[in-house]
Amino acid sequence: MSHFSLAVSDDSCSGRCYAHLDNSRGCQCNYICHKYGDCCLDFDYACRHKGTSPHTGAPAATTSSPGQNTLGPHTPVSRNNIADVLWQVDPDKFDMADITINLGNHAISGKTTDVSQDNLFTHVNTAPLSKPIYKALMELWDNYIPTRGASDLVSINDKAEIDNFLDLAMASPVMETTYNYLVDQHIFSGSKTVFRDKIFSLWFEPYSRSGGSSKDSSGFEHVFVGEYKSSIVEGFHSWLRFYSEEQAGHANYLGYLKKVGPQMVEFSFIWNGHFKKIDSFIVGSSPVFDMALATICILTRPNMSCSYTLNGYHFNIKQYDEAHTSGVQVATAYTVF
């Protein structure tokens, strides 16, 4: 007789692997159930032993890339491994086999000289971009005017698009894990509805970056879209945004400054005639992963640097609170390798 019953019941994870918290059940099968001591007895067998993927229950993807970090079935979630945990539970991250980058030559620091004639992105499998979270992200891009001082008027349609993105983000196991982690660490208290409001305030509430009356910026616009200040680019820390603008002929990759592992890159570029001296991002990350990790950082250590490790490679997130507003709002958040 099998040690575990595989029939679907209140005390089994069969068919429930990495499902959201369900208080109507006698035990849980979510990623952090071990932290709360409420895992079903067959959690390891049904979910981890068989190598199922978080959230979907599909066979987990594997990689032979150097530095790949696979968490054990009962690894406690902590500041030291939260990036790895979020990466592992993310159903929307890209497989690096679907992305090919060409670093070209080493850029001349601070110079607009183009030392790499080819694009940074040689190939991206665009099939994952049909996922709802990516469609929602790209629908937001044209809601913003990147020029400093130009008000970003939020229309009814814009608000609906923001709500759609937030609904999808909050439903992701990445944001669920983020919420549980912040509550567990006594960094945030409140319901998930309150947490959603916090995410909106941090990232989407418009403010004046220059301190004037014009609400010309937001954390989302700065990080995920990019902004102009005179002849320079500010923000623009999204790999997908860069890929899209590069494909459209709006962004010109000049060369790399630093590369860490297979997916962390620091580089220079020109965007619509504006110069970005140093930019950086994690290639293949989902927007929810980027937003979640930066949220953890700014709520934990506002205006400071947070140290993380992803797949065996060390990096920091540096973020600042917008000084011109009351309450914490993201001024910027970017990776430092």
Image (spheres, rainbow, N blue to C red):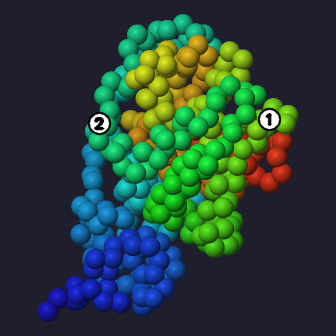
The secondary element bearing badge 2 is classed as loop
Where, by quadrant of the figure, is residue 183 drawn? bottom right
- Measured as percent of width and height from the top left, residue 5 is found at 23, 89
Position of 231 with respect to 119 (left or right) is right
Q: Where 325 sits versus 104, above or below?
A: below
Quadrant of image for the C terminus: top right
Q: Secondary structure at mark 1?
A: loop
Circle 1 or circle 2, nearest the eye: 1
Position of residue 80 relative to residue 126, above or below, is below
Q: Earlier in the sequence, mark 1 or mark 2?
A: 2
Q: Nearer the viewer, residue 201 or 115?
A: 201
**Residue denoted by label 2:** 125
Amino acid marked by disc 1: Ser
- Residue 321 as seen in the image, left or right of residue 256: right
Cα distance between the residues tagged 1 and 2: 39 Å
Q: Can residue 326 be seen in the rendering of this structure?
A: yes
Could one spot residue 298 in this view of the protein? no
> Which residue is at 80% across, 54% downward?
327
Quarter of the image holding residue 210?
top right
Query: In what quadrant of the picture does the N terminus appear?
Result: bottom left
Q: According to the image, label 1 marks what residue?
A: 214
Q: Residue at x 71, y 22 (%)?
A: 229
x and y percentages locating residue 4 in the rendered image: 24, 87
Q: Is residue 127 left or right of residue 195?
A: left
In the rendered structure, which amino acid carries the disc numbered 2? Asn
Q: Name the foreground residue: 82 vs 223.
A: 223
Instruction: Residue 112 in the image: state x and y as whole percent.
Output: 58, 10
Q: Residue furthest front?
A: 156
Give me the residue at 47% from left, 63% from top. Answer: 171
